[in-house]
Image (spheres, rainbow, N blue to C red):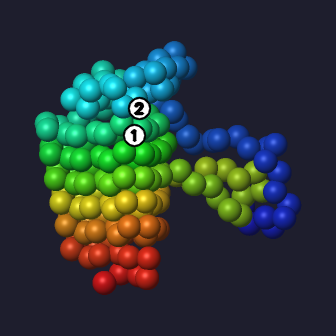
Amino acid sequence: MTADPRERSLRGFTGAGYDKGRGIAVQAAWFAALNLLFVKWWFPARWRPALLRAFGAAVGQRVLIRHRVRVQWPWKLEVGDDVWIGEDSWLINLEPITIGSDVCVSQGAMLCTGSHQRRSPTFEFDNGPIRLEPGSWVAARAVVLRGVTVGEGAVVGAGAVAHQDVKAGAVLTTGGTS
């Protein structure tokens, strides 16, 4: 569809093609666990991977997840070994997010698998998975958008926005890729 965005009608939004992956009872249980336990400073960091696993995530060994980290759907998350996820990070995984081993997702980073078709008059979803290859780093307040792979050893620098793949070993800054 190639409608004029000025003729947008959000009332007609259907969400067609998006599958949350679990029923409403599991979704509600996760939101309760997320907001009452997982994000809290007093909830032990060593228990966070276990809680994600209990809701269907595949989480490796020696994974450190700090407080105030938000995960939309654990059952759409795969995390390798020796991963660090910093405070205030947000994993909006309407589609799968795969995080390889030895990856650092720093404070306030956002991984967002969701988007919308800007030319659709009803603003339908345009989602895609995210993959962080082993040894990559998503620095503080950086954003990785839907459909992006951050290559092995690559860096999405502080405040940068990765809207397309970042090649292995590359460094993306707010000024571009080097």
Q: Of 104 and 58, which appears nearest the observer?
A: 104
Q: Of 5 and 109, which appears nearest the observer?
A: 109
Which residue ends up furthest to the right in the rendered image? 7
The circle drawn on residue 69 is: 1
Above or below residue 38? Residue 24 is above
Q: Which residue is at a point 71% across and 53% down the rendered structure image? A: 123
The circle drawn on residue 33 is: none
- Amino acid type, mark 2: Val
Q: Of 105 and 92, which appears nearest the observer?
A: 105
Q: Of 149 and 89, which appears nearest the observer?
A: 89
Can you see residue 95? no
Is 3 on the left or on the right of 102, as rendered? right
Q: Within 10 angstroms of label 2, few (less than 14), some, or many (20 or more) residues?
A: many
Q: At which x and y percent is residue 176?
A: 41, 81
The answer for how far apart the CA atoms under marks 1 and 2 are is: 6 Å
Above or below residue 166? Residue 79 is above
Above or below residue 16? Residue 32 is above
Is 109 on the left or on the right of 114, as rendered? left
Can you see residue 39? yes
Which residue matches tag 2? 39
Task: Give the SS element for disc 1.
Answer: loop
Q: Which residue is at a point 40% across and 23% down the rendered structure image? A: 37
Q: At which x and y percent is residue 150?
A: 31, 64
Q: Are marks 1 and 2 in contact (CB under 8 Å)?
A: yes
Whichever of callouts 1 and 2 sits on the residue coming sooner in the sequence is 2
Quarter of the figure with residue 79 = top left
Q: At which x and y percent is residue 113?
A: 47, 51
Q: At which x and y percent is residue 128?
A: 46, 53
Q: Quadrant of the C terminus?
A: bottom left
Task: Give the SS element for disc 2.
Answer: loop
Quarter of the figure with residue 135 = bottom left
